[in-house]
């Protein structure tokens, strides 16, 4: 962008209009534009009929998506780019459409109250939606909301889980239990990588059917089971490796200490705990995506993102040893810790 110099206005102007680019993509996904175009190139006029829109404004939306690199325009025909086909169509196994819709319907309105979140230090569910009570009741407030949230977490998780289970050699472990494992993307990735590993996805009753659906479609389906329960209250399924993926960042230190104590007690000597989280630099000065995610946690949870040093301190306090953190090059990083022999 012109003016993108250390002392020019380009950076500020880019940030001013950043939400416009997001909303252009959000709206196109919400209206099913990319799903419709996956059938083949079409005109704005034809697409306007399909989405019950006005041809002129639909043309502007499609042109905007073209400018963003999500569509290609040839004459008066529009078609998906490979990126849109892979990540923005609902039928794609790699779709991020659920996360896009969750961002549009939930996160975007909540972020409009960031200032009050910063001033008060609490999430914005009550201010935005009038919701009080247990945190995950908000995420699962309706079947449709639960479906959107879980689809979003599945798409986001698939970006990182294969690398999370690769970055450390997990061949020494026989049975991984993914606590709060959602749709099972990490358990699936682990079993598909390690040919003898058994896995259990442990999550709330409302989530378990989605995990069973995804696990059944895996080539490692015979080694994956799904068990219902609350990891804060119910007995943990036995394992020599537990996983907590994007769990600890939801909570404050008191709940984290309670959960880590339960995991440590349940593990056999030499057992492991694998964390998947977005790691801040130790000085908090980066990376940007982790800083933005930490603000996101302020807006919608009780937690925050942490550095490797902070996770190491929490894990060692709980009795874990040999704590190692590794960057994965994906949205999530990995931390592996051991229970002493």
Image (tube, grey):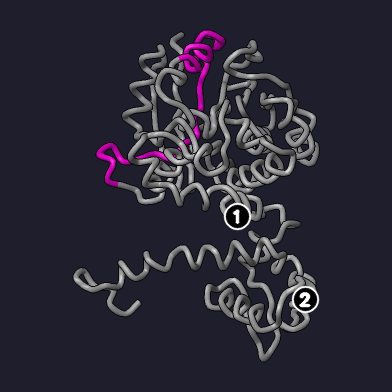
Does residue 252 sit above or below 147 in this rendering? above
| N-terminal-most mark, 1 or 2 | 2
- Residue beneath the point at 75% across and 26% down: 225
Q: Over which residues does the magenta segment extend?
A: 258-285
* Cα distance between the residues tagged 1 and 2: 22 Å
Residue 155: % across, % down: 63, 48
Alpha-carbon neighbours of circle 1 within 10 Å: few (<14), some, or many (≥20)? many
Q: Dividing the picture into quarters, in which one does residue 297 lie?
A: top left
**Furthest residue in direction bottom, as rendered:** 75
Residue 199 visible here: no
Does residue 106 sit above or below 257 in this rendering? below
Query: Residue at label 2?
Result: 40
Residue 229: % across, % down: 68, 19
Q: Tell me if 88 is positioned left or right of 225 in this view.
A: left
Residue 238: % across, % down: 64, 13
Residue 188: % across, % down: 68, 36
User: Residue 278: within the magenta?
Assistant: yes
Query: Residue at label 1?
Result: 100
Does residue 252 sit above or below 16 in this rendering? above
Which structural element holds mark 1? helix
Cβ–Cβ under 8 Å for marks 1 and 2: no
Q: Dividing the picture into quarters, in which one does residue 317 lie?
A: top left
Residue 164 visible here: yes
**Furthest residue in direction left, as rendered:** 7
Q: Tell me if 39 is positioned left or right of 23 in this view.
A: right
- Residue beneath the point at 47% across and 14% down: 258
Alpha-carbon neighbours of circle 2 within 10 Å: few (<14), some, or many (≥20)? few
Q: Quadrant of the N terminus?
A: bottom left
Which structural element holds mark 2? loop
- Residue beneath the point at 75% across and 81% down: 42
User: Residue 297: within the magenta?
Assistant: no
């Amino acid at each position: 962008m012109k003016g993108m110099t250390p002392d020019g206005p380009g950076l500020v102007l880019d940030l001013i209009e950043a939400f416009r680019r997001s909303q252009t993509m959000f709206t196109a996904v919400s209206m099913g534009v990319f799903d419709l175009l996956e059938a083949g190139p079409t005109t704005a006029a034809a697409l306007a009929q399909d989405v019950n829109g006005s041809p002129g404004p639909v043309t502007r939306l499609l042109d905007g998506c073209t400018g963003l690199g999500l569509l290609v325009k040839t004459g008066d025909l529009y078609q998906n780019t490979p990126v849109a086909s892979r990540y923005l169509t609902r039928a794609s196994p790699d779709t991020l459409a659920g996360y896009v819709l969750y961002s549009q319907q939930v996160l975007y309105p909540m972020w409009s109250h960031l200032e009050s979140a910063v001033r008060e230090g609490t999430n914005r569910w009550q201010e935005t939606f009038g919701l009080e009570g247990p945190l995950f009741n908000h995420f699962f407030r309706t079947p449709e909301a639960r479906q959107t949230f879980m689809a979003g977490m599945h798409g986001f998780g698939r970006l990182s889980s294969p690398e999370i289970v690769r970055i450390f050699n997990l061949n020494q472990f026989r049975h991984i239990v993914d606590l709060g494992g959602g749709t099972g993307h990490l358990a699936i990735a682990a079993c598909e990588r390690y040919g003898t590993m058994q896995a259990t996805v442990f999550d709330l009753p409302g989530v378990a059917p989605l995990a069973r659906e995804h696990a059944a479609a895996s080539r490692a389906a015979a080694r994956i089971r799904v068990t219902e329960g609350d990891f804060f209250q119910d007995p943990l399924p036995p394992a020599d490796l537990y996983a907590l993926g994007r769990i600890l960042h939801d909570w404050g230190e008191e709940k984290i200490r309670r959960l880590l104590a339960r995991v440590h007690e349940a593990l056999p000597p030499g057992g492991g705990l694998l964390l998947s989280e977005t790691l801040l630099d130790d000085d908090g000065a980066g990376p940007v995506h982790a800083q933005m995610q930490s603000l996101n946690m302020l807006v919608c949870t009780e937690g925050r993102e942490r550095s490797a040093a902070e996770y190491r301190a929490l894990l060692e306090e709980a009795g874990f040893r040999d704590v190692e953190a590794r960057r994965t090059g994906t949205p999530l990083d990995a931390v592996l810790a051991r229970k002493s022999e």
